[in-house]
Image (spheres, helix red, strand yellow):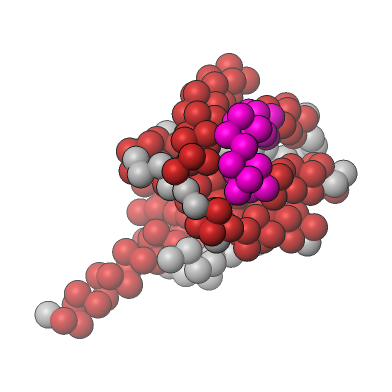
Amino acid sequence: MADLKHLITAQERLRDQVAHALRAALVAGELRPGNVYSAPGLAADFGISATPVREAMLDLAREGLVEPVRNKGFRITEVSERDLDQYMELRAMIEVPTVGKVTQLASPERLEDLRPIAEEIVASARDHDLIGYLEADRRFHLTLLGMAGNERLVETVGDLRKRSRLYGLTGLDKRGLLVSSAEEHHELLDLMTAGDEVGAEACMARHLGHVRSLWAQARDEPVEPRPKLRLGNHQ
């Protein structure tokens, strides 16, 4: 029974890793809205069997990121400009005041623990590592919000981040626009560790507005060839 439990745990871990990698590929624009992808085809990219990929895609379907297509696979759902605006409005309503609250509650030392992740975001942008950039950005924002002590809030923002995915980051990366957005995380930490609640809230509002403007530019980017997907360690 112990061996079986270990096997199940390993299978669940692989399924979670695949789902995470697919979400990152969606956000980065490696999987295009409206296109249909088969589980065996994606599994070949990952170098694994189709079963955990199919299970992961069903998880994404429950999140509204893909929709099953009978006998073909899964279609990436479209996200309209109106959807993006509404998602970002909700994020701003939650994240801006929460940053102010965390500025009051968290010690400078605890906030400084996020500095390596902020640097990881910048380094990934400079190294043209879009998946690394997006993963570090997710960890930074959700960890920061978690300092407010509201787990449901973090879950809500995490869901909004999944649904309000970016498009065509390759073109933005080529023009160097991701680096300036990445560097705003250091600016935010500087304001928060200094206890500047008003400045931190203004910085977060500006950062979210900057991200939304990147979306608008990215949606006009030409379709890039899809690179080979890869799994990472997302424990």
Give the residue at x 58% y 58%.
112
Counting from the top left corner in percent of width and height, residue 17 is at 45, 62
Give the residue at x 58% y 17%.
82
Which quarter of the picture shows residue 184? top right
Which quarter of the picture shows residue 136? bottom right
Instruction: From the viewer's side, name the closer residue of 179 and 233.
Output: 179
Quadrant of the snapshot with the N terminus: bottom left
* Residue furthest out toward the left: 1
Q: Is 119 displayed left or right of 108 in the figure?
A: right
Give the residue at x 54% y 59%.
109
Question: Which SS does the magenta portion mostly show?
Answer: helix
- The answer to if 14 sits in the magenta stretch is no
Quadrant of the snapshot with the C terminus: bottom left
For the record, the magenta segment spans 189-207
Specify whether residue 109 is in view. Answer: yes
Which quarter of the picture shows residue 210? top right
* Residue furthest out toward the bottom: 3
Q: Is residue 204 above or below residue 124?
A: above
Q: Is 221 displayed left or right of 53 in the figure?
A: right
Q: Is 47 displayed left or right of 218 in the figure?
A: left
Instruction: From the viewer's side, name the closer residue of 34 and 24.
Output: 24
Q: Is residue 135 above or below residue 145?
A: below
